[in-house]
Amino acid sequence: MKLNQDGLKLTGTLVASDINQGLRKDDGKPWARRTAMISTGKTCITYSESINFEDIEKALPYEIGTRVEVDVTYCNTNSGSISVGGELSLIETKVTK
């Protein structure tokens, strides 16, 4: 992660991605969330974003091996794990060999 005049930027490679969904315990409303693990080469950081539940059928996990950049809007640590949220951009798609 780098801090510059535009804010905190995370650049890395996607090493895992999944979509989870369910119903909230408090009111029973549906929720959906896409999570991804981004490797910087030195550490792995969890990225997550909410997905509109009506769009869940069209939503796909991110392709593993893709280079990404996140404009970080929040960062959290818990028991040594780092989680971030913000705007994820694909830098380049996976290169197959």
Image (cartoon, rainbow, N blue to C red):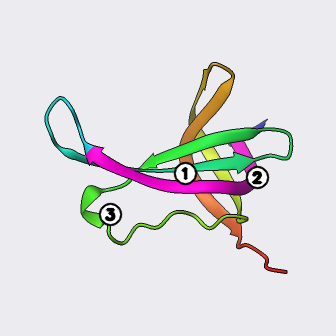
Discs 1/3, front = 3
Q: Is residue 92 magenta?
A: no
**Residue depicted at x 70% and y 65%:** 66
Position in image of residue 57 (x %, y %): 32, 69
Residue 25 horizontal side relative to residue 83, left or right: left
Which residue is tagged 1?
A: 87
Discs 2/3, front = 3
The mark found on residue 56 in the picture is: 3
From this viewpoint, is residue 28 visible? yes
Amino acid under label 2? Answer: Gly
Closer to the chain start, of discs 2 and 3, is: 2
Position in image of residue 47 (x %, y %): 58, 44
**Residue most extreme to the left:** 27
Q: How many marks?
A: 3
Crowding around mark 3 (Cα neighbors within 10 Å: few <14, some 14 to 19, many 20+) is some
Bounds of the magenta segment = 5-22
Position in image of residue 25 (x %, y %): 21, 32
Q: CA distance from mark 1 to mark 3?
A: 19 Å
Residue 44 horizontal side relative to residue 53, left or right: right
Does 68 appear above or below 45? Answer: below
Position in image of residue 70 (x %, y %): 64, 49
Which residue is tagged 2?
A: 12
Q: Closer to the camera, 5 or 34?
A: 34
